[in-house]
Amino acid sequence: MKKIFYIFLALTFPFVGMAQDLAPCGTVQTEEDLKELRAFQKAYYNGEIDYERDNVLKYIPVMLHQIRKANGSGGMLFGDLIDRLCLANEQYAGSNSDIMFTWDGIRVHQNDAWYDSHDNFIYNQKVPNKVNVFVANHANGACGFYTPPANNQTSDYVFIAKSCLQDWNITLAHELGHLLGLPHNFSGWEGTEYNCNTSAPVWAEKFDGSNCSTAGDGFCDTPPDYISDRWDCNSNDQSNCVLRDANGDTGNAPGTFYMCYSNDDCSSTSGGFSNDQVAAMQNHISSIRGNISFTNPTWSDIMDDATVLQSPINEEQLEYNNWIRFEFDPVPNATHYLVEIATTPIFNIVPDYFLTTETVIDHYKKLLDNKTYYWRVRPMNRGNFCTNYTSQNGSFVTSAVSAVTDVAGLQAFSVFPNPAPENSNVQVKISLKDAIDVQIQLLSIDGKVVQNEKRFLNAGHNDMILNTDNLESGMYFLSLQTKDGVTTEKIIIE
Ligand SMILES: [Zn+2]
């Protein structure tokens, strides 16, 4: 009981933003990685290609990956993750990019090592033909990074520290910019400290426009930027540091670009990418991402304000503290529903949440005793995920009793060993007064059915084996359901 209580606490601690203390980005791009971009820039600025925007919206499918601690705590709330993808779309729309990222799902990974640092083997978790975005507690000391080159199977994903995905941020837009082929505005200065007001080398981009296509980011519509450390901007959203080029001309770096290292609040939803940066991303999509991008929506609009909750809605007293049946009306065109369960009616403390495709859900989760909980639903689909939650919240009050004894004729239900090691055989003992048909389900902490089996069990003792191969460590619920009721046992896989 105590242990569960602490898990809830860990999930609900307010997160202290520390984005500005981290290096903005850990992406390392070589000239080899930028080869395709350089060829495009050369042809573009030499007039060798007659580039014209087709003004057709390109959709790029994104798979989000939430990395949690092994005990299931610490992951960034699904709702917040999805909201950050919405923000990235606003930022891309604000530059008239004709690029929109779709939400193709969230995968959950429970792994302490992955949660606290980046592990190269994470690439095994990538979903093919999607842009994969992993969000963990840390990203190797940076806010995030993209792993080029795009044609290497073990790379080509984005990894982000969750502290850099709070409210207004540009980390996701920035790393997706790298993924779509863009370098930093100050490209070439990485690892080199520029001393303000000192003459830059002759190769560097100059304020009269010379070197613009050969130095820095190679774009002629982004002004010189020599600053490769995080910097704060003045009231004009420019660097306080004065840049001096080899001609002696001076200026300040603009902080509004998503691909520079200014603090996030120097930028806004408009003008984060220059026209030429957008042209390069468009070129990258057609030449490199043609296999995953698409132009025809596969979804229809969702009327999110039409969501109606059915049950429980009015602080109904539940019989149990570890099993709830949620019911709400289907929402036309929604393929998924995000259900959030909070301890406050304003949903600032959300100890439990899950994604579902159903509208009647038997949810197994140990909740606090005799406590009022609130729940709400957000209908979504691939292209409509910046939707609203139900305007009206449902609510219920838990009991002090766990649902463990309400299957008629059940005399014993036990699991051994518990906690159980990974890749082992767990013994499940069930003693029954009478022979009966049972459905046995293993559920993950977020209510997903991991294993499902129907059995006819004899009167007396029944021994079963639960194999934990391929189960990630964490908390699970083993549910035993008969025509008379349901009972659950908590299992910890270590
Ligand atoms: Zn970067």
Image (cartoon, helix red, strand yellow):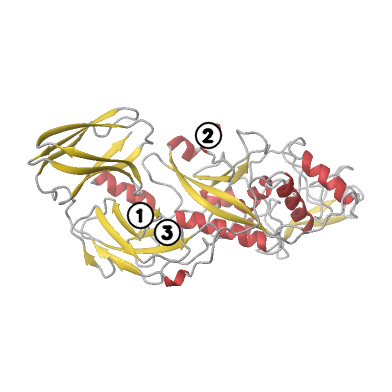
Q: Residues within 10 Å of mark 3 (few under 14, many from 20)?
A: many
Amino acid type, residue under disc 1 in the picture: Pro
Q: Which residue matches tag 2?
A: 124
Amino acid type, residue under disc 2 in the picture: Asn
Relative vertical location of residue 83 with respect to residue 69 in this rendering, above or below: below
Residue at 92% x, 50% y: name it: 247
Residue at 34% x, 65% y: name it: 328
- Pick the front one: 126 or 188: 126
| Label 3 residue near ligand 1, CB within 8 Å | no
Q: Secondary structure at mark 1?
A: loop
Asked whether the beta carbons under mark 2 and mark 3 sit within 8 Å of each other, the answer is: no
Amino acid type, residue under disc 3 in the picture: Tyr
Q: Residues within 10 Å of mark 1 (few under 14, many from 20)?
A: many
Toward the top, the furthest residue is 424
**Of discs 1 and 3, which sits in the foreground?**
3
| Label 1 residue near ligand 1, CB within 8 Å | no
Q: Secondary structure at mark 2?
A: helix
486 displayed left or right of 70: left
Q: Which residue matches tag 1?
A: 351
Would you say residue 422 is visible in this rendering?
yes
Q: Secondary structure at mark 3?
A: strand
425 displayed left or right of 355: left
**Of discs 2 and 1, which sits in the foreground?**
2
- Pick the front one: 266 or 232: 266
Compare marks 1 and 3 and give the one earlier in the sequence. Answer: 3
Residue at 33% x, 33% y: name it: 494
Marks 2 and 1 sit apart, C-alpha to C-alpha, by 29 Å
Relative vertical location of residue 188 with respect to residue 268 in this rendering, above or below: above
- Could you say where residue 391 lies in the image, as x and y percent from the top left? 41, 72
Q: Which residue matches tag 3?
A: 337
